[in-house]
Image (spheres, rainbow, N blue to C red):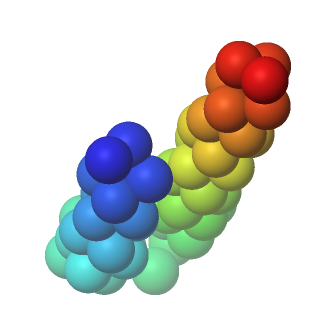
């Protein structure tokens, strides 16, 4: 469930970026996308750790 939510946020973030940031604000735009994908990766890692620790 959480993976789908974060993936949805990543898609929305991808479509909102060109409308939010100008060409001169490329660094905040890239940082925004980077943080979205890092949060998704960390969530997946935590989910896998939680699944493996139940065994």
Rendered residue at 60%/64% (across/down): 30
Compared with 46, 10 (above or below) is: below
Comparing 10 with 42, the one in front is 42
Task: Check the image and name the residue furthest to the top.
Answer: 54
Q: Is residue 21 above or below residue 34?
A: below
* Percent x, y of residue 11: 33, 74
Which residue corresponds to the image point at 71% horizontal and 19% vertical from the top-left?
54
Q: Residue at x 28, y 64 (%)?
A: 8
Q: Is residue 28 in view from this perspective? A: no
Horizontal and vertical percent for residue 42?
69, 37
How many numbered markers are drawn?
0
Depicted 52 relative to depicted 12: above or below: above
Residue 33 horizontal/vertical position (percent): 53, 61
Report the side of 4 relative to 23 (left or right).
left
User: Residue at position x 26%, y 80% from top?
Assistant: 15
- Quarter of the image that includes the C terminus: top right
Does the image show residue 45? yes
Residue situated in front as seen by the camera: 54 or 12: 54
Along the horizontal axis of the image, is 55 left or right of 5? right
Q: Residue furthest front?
A: 55
Q: Position of residue 23 (x, y in %)?
A: 46, 80
Depth check: give the residue in front, 22 or 54. 54
Return the residue nearer the eye: 35 or 52: 52
Left or right of residue 43: residue 17: left
Q: Quadrant of residue 52?
A: top right
Would residue 52 appear left or right of 11 to someone viewing this image? right
């Amino acid at each position: 469930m959480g993976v789908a939510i974060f993936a949805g946020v990543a898609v929305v973030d991808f479509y909102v970026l060109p409308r939010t940031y100008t060409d001169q604000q490329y660094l905040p735009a890239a940082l925004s996308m980077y943080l979205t994908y890092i949060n998704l990766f960390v969530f997946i890692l935590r989910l896998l750790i939680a699944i493996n620790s139940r065994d």
